[in-house]
Amino acid sequence: MMLKRFLRSRGMRKLRRNRMAMVASAVIGLYALVALFALFGGVSLDDTKRRVWRENTPGFLQPMSKEIADYTLDWHADKWLRPKMEAARRASDERSRQFSFDTAALGQRTLADLPGDELIALWDEAAGIYDEWRELQDTADEANEELEFFRIDLDAERAKDAPDQDMIEELEGEIEYYEGQLEQAARAPELAADLRAKLLELHPVPTGVPGMVYRAKLWFGTDSKGASIIIKGLYATKIAFQIGFVTAVGAVLIGTLLGAAAGFFGRFVDEAVMWIVSTLSSIPYLVLLAVLVVMFRGSIFDNEARPALALVPLYAAFGMTFWVGTCRVIRGEVMKIKELEYVQAATAIGFARPYIVLRHVVPNTVHLMFINFSLLFIAAIKGEVILSFLGLGVKGQPSWGIMIAHSKDQVSSGFFWEILTATALMFGLVLAFNILSDALQDAFDPKHVS
Amino acid sequence: MSKTNSGEPVLKVRHLTTRFRTDRGVVTAVDDVSFDVYPGETVGIVGESGCGKTVTSKSIMRLLPEQVTIIDEKSEIMFEGENIARLSEKRMREVRGDRIAMIFQEPMTSLNPVFRIGWQLDEALRYHTKLGRKQRRERAIEMLKLVDIPNPEKRIDEYPHQLSGGMRQRVMIAMALCCEPDVLIADEPTTALDVTIQAQILSLMNSLKEKLQTAIMLITHDLGVVAQVCDRVVVMYAGRVIESGPVADIFRRPQHPYTQALLDSIPKQGNKERGLRLATIPGIVPSLWDLPHGCRFQDRCKFKEQRCVDGEPVLEDGPDGRPVRCHFPLDEARHPQHLAGRHAEGA
Amino acid sequence: MALLEVRDLHKRFPKHGGVLNRVVGNVHAVNGVSFDVNEGEVVGIVGESGCGKSTLGKTVIQLLGATEGSIKFDDQELTSLSHAEMMPFRRKMQMIFQDPYSSLNPRLTVRQLLREAIRFHKVVGADQVEAHIDSIIEKVGLRPDSKDKFPHEFSGGQRQRIGIARALCLKPKFLVADEPVSALDVSIQAAVLNLMMDLKDEFGLTMMFISHDLKVVEHFCDRVLVMYLGHVVEELTCDNLHADARHPYTTALLGANPIDDPTQRRSLTILKGDVPSPYNPPPGCPFTTRCPVVKDRCHQEMPPLEDKDATPGHRAACWEVEGAGVASSAAAGEG
C-alpha cells in the first residue's frame, strides 16, 4: 500500500518522465540482477578462483598476435597438458591416472570423453606434433639469427677494396643453407594448426551452453592466476551491492531516527545528537574507517577463510560514519516540517508526540531517505573500493578494489583487462546511481512538489 | 476621475500569447491578450490566481525562463514604435529597467540582502545613465526622498534587513523609478503588506503617477485596490481577457458574469449584509491543460446556455459599449438587483 | 456565562543570542490580554502581522503554553492541565489554519486524516466511524469520492474544506479559525465563509476568528478585538463598527482599507511609519510611534482597556479617547 501510493505520487510520476533516470534505473536493475544471480549461487566464490586459461590472457578487444597465439599454444600443450599427461602415463593405478586426467580440466574444458589409453595415444600424437613444431621454431629462430650475421658479414666482405672470393662463396653457401632451413620452418604454422586441432580433439571446447559459458568467461581475459576476470568482476558486483545495501540501509535508518528525534524534540536530544554528529564529521572518514578496520585485525573478522565475516568491519565502519549526513539533512527537514500547520493540527487533536513524529513527520522525509540511500550506496561502494585497494577492506573474496590493486603490475606491462573491467563496472554503477540520485532530487525537491 | 485617453498609448499589447513547455505538454498561459496603456494612467490587470496576469507582465518584461517559454509569433508588444517581443536580449536590457520598470510582490526577496540600498540604487543608474559617481548618489537620495523614506542620507547606507517591509517596497519603487521609466509594471505590489502599509504604498503610487506622469500597469487580485487607484481595468480569466473598460463602468455595470460574480463575492464594508451569505462562484478555475470547449467560464456561469458550449465568444463591444467576451453580456435587465444595490450604496 | 474566559494572558518568546546562545531578551507577543467569548458568539481578532493575534489563538487552545495569566474554558483552568488532563478539552477546542497547503499532511488521504482523529477521541463507536466521515465530508461540501484522495489532488478552497472537516469531525464546541480565508482567491473566499457560517449554526459553534481583513471580520463576527503589538487596543461589537470605533488605530485600520467602489474613492487614512519591532517596543502605549493624537502621557503609561461609552462591551485602551467617548455616551444617555 505504502509502495503503491509512493509509485503513484507526483514525484514518482515526474521521475518516470525523466528518460535518463529511467535508463539509469534499468542499468542499476541490471547490476542488481547480476548481484542477485551471484548471491543465489550463479557465480560461486570458487568460480572466481578457478583457472580457465593461461595467465593474463587478453580479452576480446585485443587481437591475438602471432607471438601471443604461439605462446598460448605452447602454454596449452607444454605447460598445462604435458605434466598432467606424463603423470597419467606414469600413474601406477587407475585412480591416480584418472586424477591426472581430471586435473587437466581447464574451466569448462575437460579432456575428451575417451578411454585413458586412447587419451594418452592422442596426447602422444599431439606431443609429437608439438615437439616437431617447437624444433621447427627453434630451427627458424636459429636460422634467422645466423642469416642476419652471415648477411652482415657478406655485405662487409663485398664492401672491401679487395674482396676475398672464397670467403664470399663460403658465406653465400651458409646463407643458402639457412634459407633452406627457413623454408622448411615455414611449415611451422601448418604444424601449429595441426597441433591446435589435436589439442582441440584432446581438450575439446564444449558445445551448447557450457561452450558459451566458457567463451564468455574469456571475454575479458584472465588474471595473473588464469581465473576469469569477468567472473571476478561479476562476483565483486555482489560484494559491492552487499556492502552498499547493508550500509546504506543501516546508515539511513540510524540517520533518520536520530535526525528526526533531534529535529523534533530539540533541546538536549538535539544537543546530544548534534554533538556526536559534529564529532564524527570532524574526523576525515577514510582515516576513521582505516582505524576501525585496523582495530578489527586479528579478530575473527580478519580471517581469509571466512570472507562473509570479514565484511563486518566494513559494515560497522561505514554504518558508523555515513549516517551523519543523513542525520543532518533529516534534522533540518524535520525542524521545517515541525512548524507546518498539519503538525500543529495533529497537536491540537491531542496526539502524543512520538505518534506525531512517526505518523506525520517522518513519512514526509521519505524522499530524503531515498536520495540519501542512493548517495550512501555509492559512497559505500566507493569507500569499499578504496579500502580494498589499500588492503584494508574485503578479504578472501574478489572486489573491484582488490582487482584494481592487483593490476598495478599488469598495467605497466601492457595488460589492462583487469583494471578496465573493475573500473568499467564501477563506473557504470556509480554513474547510474549519480544520475538516479540527481533525478530523485529533482523529482522530490519540495520546491516542485507541494 | 475618469481620464480621457488622449494621444498615443505608450504601451500597446496585441495578441500576446505565451505558452510554456511543461512535463505535461505545452500549455497556453496567456491567450491572445490585447490592451493599451496610455501615458499617466493606471491600468489594473485583475483576476484570480492562475488567470495569467503575472505571466502577461513578465512576458512584457521578457522575464520568463527562455528555455520553457514560447511567445507566439503573432504577439506584438509595441513600445516606442518597436515590437519589444522581438527585440534582441541586448536591446531589451536597455529597455528593461530604464524605459519599462517593474516592482514585485515580495519586498523581502526582491532586494539583494548583501548589498547596501545605495549600491543597489546606484547599480541601475550606472547601467542606464551617464551620471558621475557623486551625481548618482545625489539622485539616489533624491529618489529615496521622493518615495517618502525618512532620513534618506542615512538610509542609503543601510542594508535591506535593516528596513521594514513597507520601507523595502518603497526602495523597490525608488529603484524602479530612478531612470524615470515611461511604464511601471507593479505585480501585486501590496499583497504581502499590511493594510496600513498598503495604504501608504497606494497613495505613494498615486502621487508619483501625478508627479512623474508614469503609466502604471497594476497587477492585482484585490478589487478594493483596483477601485482605489486604477483608471482602467482589464479583467482576465483562464488566460483570456474577458472584459475591460474604465474602472467606474466595470464596478458599476459589469458586463461579464464573472466580473459581476467576483464583485458580489467580496464582503461589503458597512453592515448592510452582515451575517448574510455571500454570493459565490461555484466550482473552480479550469486547469489550463484541460480547458472546456467553448467559453472558459461556462462551468461556473449561472447564465450558461448551449451556445456557450458550442463556441468560445470573441472579445467585442457589449451593450455598454465596452469590450466583453461573452455570448450573453449582462445589461440592466439581466441583473437589476445587483445594480440597484450598487447604486444605493454609491449614493 | 462565558464559554471562554481569558484573563491577563501573557506570552513571551525568549530570544536567544550571543556566543553562548543565552536568552538575551523576550518578544512579548501577547501582553496582558483579557476577554470573554460567550457561547455561540464569533469573536474576531484583527491586527497587522506581528501583532500577536495568531499567538493569542494558539495559546488559547494550548498549542503554545501561556507564560502568565489564566485561560478558563467551561469554567476549567487550562493553563495548569497535564497532557492527559487536557485531552477532553483538545476534542472540544479545535483550530482551522491559514495555509491550505501546509495544513494537510500530504501523505494521508482525507479518510485516513479524519479516521485517525475520530478513532483517537472515540467520537463515535467503531462501527460508525465511516458513516461519520461520510457525513462530515458531505457537510463541508466535498464530493463523497474525495475520501480516498490525497491533499494535492484538491484546489486551495477544497483543501480548506478538508481542514474544516478535520476540526469538525471531533464535534468541538469552540473553534479558533486562524486566517482561514486569507490564502484563497476572492471567489473561493466567499464560499468558504458561507460554509463556516452554515456550520457554525449547525454545530452550535463558538468561534475565535483571526484575520487581518476588516471587511471579512465585519461580515462574519459578532464582536471584534483589535490588537496592536501584543495588546488589545479596542474591543467593540461589529453591528456598527465604523461609527463605534474610537481608538485611533482602529479608525486608521478602517480608513486604510480600500473600498471596492470607485465612486467612493477617497484618500486612504495614512498612518506614518511601520509597526515597531516587537523586540523593542516603545514605552507606554505601543501605538505612540504612529498615533496621530499622541500626547505626553501616552509615552509614559499604557492606557488600560476600559469602557469608553454606554455601549456594552465597547472597551478601548487610549488616554485620548476618553473625552469623546464620555461625551458621546453622556449625550446618548441624555437622548
Image (cartoon, coloured by chain):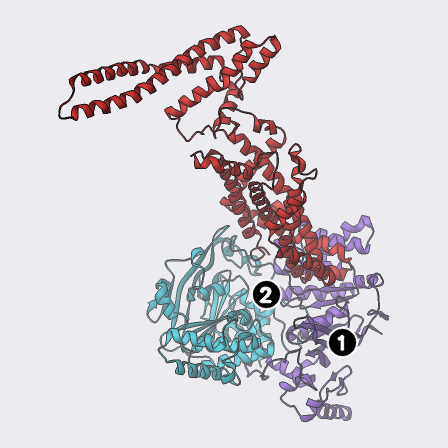
Residue at 56 percent across and 25 percent down: it is: A50
User: Which residue is nearer to you in this view: A298 or A274?
Assistant: A298
Residue at 68% of width from left, 70% of height from top? C21
Instruction: Work out whether residue C15 or residue B139 is closer to the camera in this orientation and state it.
Output: C15
Residue A328 x, y percent position in the rendering: 64, 57
In the displayed structure image, the side of residue C191 where residue C68 appears, left or right: right
Q: Chain of mark 2?
A: C
The C terminus of chain C: image quadrant: bottom right
* Numbered badge on residue C185: 2
Q: Is residue B288 above or below residue B208?
A: above
Viewport quadrant of the N terminus of chain C: bottom right
Give the left or right position of residue A338, taking residue A176 as reference.
right
Tell which tag, 1 or 2, sits nearer the viewer. Answer: 1
Which amino acid, mark 2?
Asp
Image colour for chain A is red
Which chain did the renderer colour cyan? Answer: B
Taking the image as shown, residue A335 lies to the left or right of residue A446, namely right
Say which residue label 1 marks.
C10
Q: Are marks 1 and 2 on the same chain?
A: yes
Residue B105, compared with residue A294, is above or below; it is below
Q: Position of residue A332 (x, y in %)?
A: 64, 59
Give the color of chain C as drawn.
purple
The x and y percentages for residue B85 are: 37, 63
